[in-house]
Image (spheres, rainbow, N blue to C red):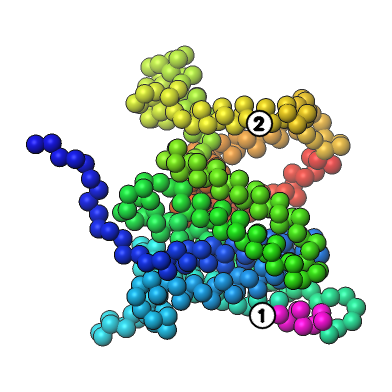
Amino acid sequence: MLLAAEHFVRAPQWQSYILGYFFFAGLTGGCYALATILRLVGHERDEAAARVGFYASFVTLLVCPVLLTADLGASWSRFWHMLIDVTPGDQGLNFKYASPMSVGVWALLIFGFFATVSAFEALVLDRRSSTATGAPARPLGGMLGRAFNIVGGILALFIASYTGVLLSVSNQPVWSDTWVLGGLFLASGLSGSAALIALLTRYRADAVFSLARLHEAGAYFAVLELVLLAAFVVVGRGLGASGAFASGAAGLVAAAAPHSAAASPLFARYLAGDGPWSEWLLFELAGVVIGGFLSALVAGRLRLVIERGPHASRGGRLAYAFAGGSIMGVGAVLARGCTSGLALTGGALLSAGSWLFMIAAFAGAYLLAPVVKKAWR
């Protein structure tokens, strides 16, 4: 007897409230992240739009626990039951690190502290600016103020993306078959947040300065959202770059010395199956190279040039590039992935190792920048 293959899963018990929660979680996280970027790396006149972003993040945050508890069929006043176990004889903190729902609720609580403080700070600064004469009030400065916004920004990115991860770890068909939902939800949240802040600048004259930047950022986020959506539909697996070089190297070594390649633990796994030349990452990388070439050709920027500082030699610049690429290649092997695979794929899945790798990569680059910038002078 031939039986049709089916997914043996229970129907999800989600209600329409969860859709609102996903929407507002993306907005609250995206607005805070964009406000932090505008404040820390933007122009001085971007501060007004940053405050708009902090206000929007706080207001949209207030809706999240209401919608979340309503979807679970409980009163919003019982949101704290998701944080504290009130079971007789088993009272205590209700935190389960292996549960995306539990981690998300605690992240929402901690992020709420940052969003509330930042919104209150923006309110105080606006009041001071409206009553004081002379220069407008400035936000908390120094390392402490910047660190506060950076930590809040990281939590904001987590909030905007974890709802997608919550779906991808379920046993529901389609959602559980992909890694890309976390990144897709994050890109969607950032795109919507850029549009929301841009809309709110209509009611604040001094924030109009940032309107063009918000429109540009929103366009980039929308393109990223489309790319991730296409990856969700077409690819069905993680993205990366270093794997393409490893597959290509394995194929070349196998062609030149097949016995040595087969005996190598590094190359053997790339030679299994259909062989290294069938690895789709090779086609992905080829598409990137061809697409970049055609883009430069159409834009009239196709020329051979070595980017370097005014006093840096060509040989020195190439030596730095080769050394940096080699070190990054070794790091990618040790970390089991490069900035593309770990950031886009592992980061979208909220993998702790991927986030630690990215933090270490950016921190190392920031600390080393004063040393290597001499090569550009």
> Where 199 sits versus 281, above or below?
below
Instruction: Give the secondary structure at mark 2.
Output: helix
Residue 44 placed where, x, y %?
81, 64
Q: On residue 120, which mark appears?
A: 1
For the residue carrying disc 2, how many other residues have a C-alpha within 10 Å: few (<14), some (14-19), or many (20+)? Answer: few
Decide if residue 246 is on the left or right side of residue 365: left
For the residue carrying disc 1, how many other residues have a C-alpha within 10 Å: few (<14), some (14-19), or many (20+)? Answer: some
Residue 221 placed where, x, y %?
62, 51
Amino acid type at circle 1 is: Phe
State the residue in front, 25 or 274. Answer: 25
Q: Is residue 266 visible?
A: yes
Of all residues, the one furthest to the left in this rendering is 1
Asked if residue 127 is among those painted magenta in the image, a careful observer would answer yes
Residue at 72% x, 49% y is: 369
Instruction: Give the secondary structure at mark 1.
Output: helix
Q: Quarter holding the N terminus? A: top left
**Prevalent SS, magenta region:** helix
Residue at 65% x, 37% y is: 324
Residue 69 placed where, x, y %?
40, 75
State the residue in front, 225 or 138. Answer: 225
Question: Do the residues under discs 1 and 2 have CB atoms within 8 angstroms?
Answer: no
Q: Which residues are magenta?
A: 123-130
Residue 168 placed where, x, y %?
39, 53
Q: Earlier in the sequence, mark 1 or mark 2?
A: 1
Amino acid type at circle 2 is: Gly
Q: Which residue is mark 2?
A: 292
> Where 280 sits versus 258, above or below?
below
Of all residues, the one furthest to the top in this rendering is 256
